[in-house]
Amino acid sequence: MHASTTIDVPETFVATYGADRPEAQVWLAELPRLGGSFLERWELRPDGPAAHGMASLVLPVLRADGAPAVLKLQQLREETAGVADGLRAWRGDGVVRLLKHDDASATQLLERLDAARPLSSLDDGETALQVLAGLMARLTAVPAPQGVRRLSDIATAMVDATAQAAPALRDPVERKLLETCAATVRELVGDAGDRLLHWDMHSGNVLAGEREPWLAIDPEPLAGDPGFDLLPALDDRWGEVVASGDVTRAVLRRFDVLTEAVDTDRRRAVGWTLGRVLQNGLWDVADGKSALEPTQVAIATALLAHRG
Ligand SMILES: Nc1ncnc2c1ncn2[C@@H]1O[C@H](COP(=O)(O)OP(=O)(O)O)[C@@H](O)[C@H]1O
Ligand SMILES: [Mg+2]
């Protein structure tokens, strides 16, 4: 009998993935065989070593006709639910094309892009920001399809969770900040928008392509206001913000570039960015932390001081 096909899983992925989650270990143990089963089912041949991020394994492959692609394997999570619907709705316009999808395991076959040239590798931070803003404007101009999670639901849940979470923060200034974020979101939640958001548009999630110079990868789609998409581009390449010598000014300048590009007004963009700070803060508290990330505090403080 033939041993069934397996794939090689990089040691660095095994070492970092879900060490504290037993169900992640079960998935990891199955991963070589899961990957192998998709090679057989979709008639793919491995074509180089696998790459990975925090959450997924990405294997370069060749299809039966010799066309390059990548096989992306990840654990089913709430955030992966709308990925196929979102990618189909974008139709490859500014974003990687979805070639095949397995709903049961959230496995994707994607168009191959140049993993050696992420937007984060560009020397010029200003150009990187312009690219992010341009892609974000195009992606968030598309109406969200059925099947993606809704910002209105997520925002309502965040507001409801704040009172219980805030006391976990040691610094009263941070407690107040979290509550201010929640109060701002509460005002916007009834009109949370219906555009297709990417949710994770930072320069590591944009790769060089051939049919377009740059294409977004790795969306966690949701239906909402484009203002909720800005934060990953605000805290991107943060070293450059710090090196500018004026964090507030640099944050506001990025904010201006992004809000000019996307279709939302400044008040909403401020409010929904505070919503992202709230989301990150709630996750930090859930992870047992008792302080917010300084980057998040700096962004929220800059926006609150210049609200309007
Ligand atoms: N379409 C693609 N073509 C080539 N490489 C890719 C592609 N998609 C992802 N990769 C590589 O895999 C890595 C992780 O993929 P990503 O979709 O960002 O997953 P994660 O959720 O783990 O961040 C990327 O940083 C990139 O190196
Ligand atoms: Mg990624």
Image: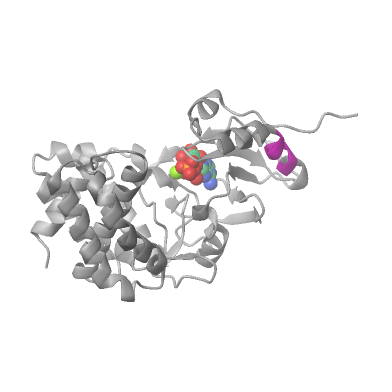
The answer to whether residue 295 is left or right of residue 23 is left
- Report the residue at 28% width, 44% height from top: 236
The answer to whether residue 287 is left or right of residue 303 is right
Visible in this render: residue 169?
yes
- Report the residue at 77% width, 42% height from top: 40
Q: How many marks?
A: 0
Q: Range of the magenta residues? A: 33-38
- Report the residue at 35% width, 64% height from top: 155
Q: Quadrant of ligand 2?
A: top left
Q: Residue 38 in the image: x percent, y percent?
A: 71, 43
| Foreground pick, 9 / 20 | 20
Figure check: 271 above or below 61: below
Magenta stretch holds residue 37: yes
- Report the residue at 69% width, 39% height from top: 34
Q: Main secondary structure of the magenta part?
A: helix
The answer to whether residue 156 is left or right of residue 178 is right
Q: Residue 64 in the image: x percent, y percent?
A: 75, 45
Q: Quadrant where the C terminus lies?
A: bottom left
Residue furthest to the bottom in view is 191
The answer to whether residue 30 is left or right of residue 12 is right
Residue furthest to the right in view is 1
| Foreground pick, 26 / 74 | 26
Figure check: 216 above or below 157: above
Q: Residue 93 in the image: x percent, y percent?
A: 48, 62
Magenta stretch holds residue 212: no
Visible in this render: residue 96?
no
Q: Quadrant where the N terminus lies?
A: top right
Q: Residue 163 in the image: x percent, y percent?
A: 27, 57
| Foreground pick, 125 / 50 | 50
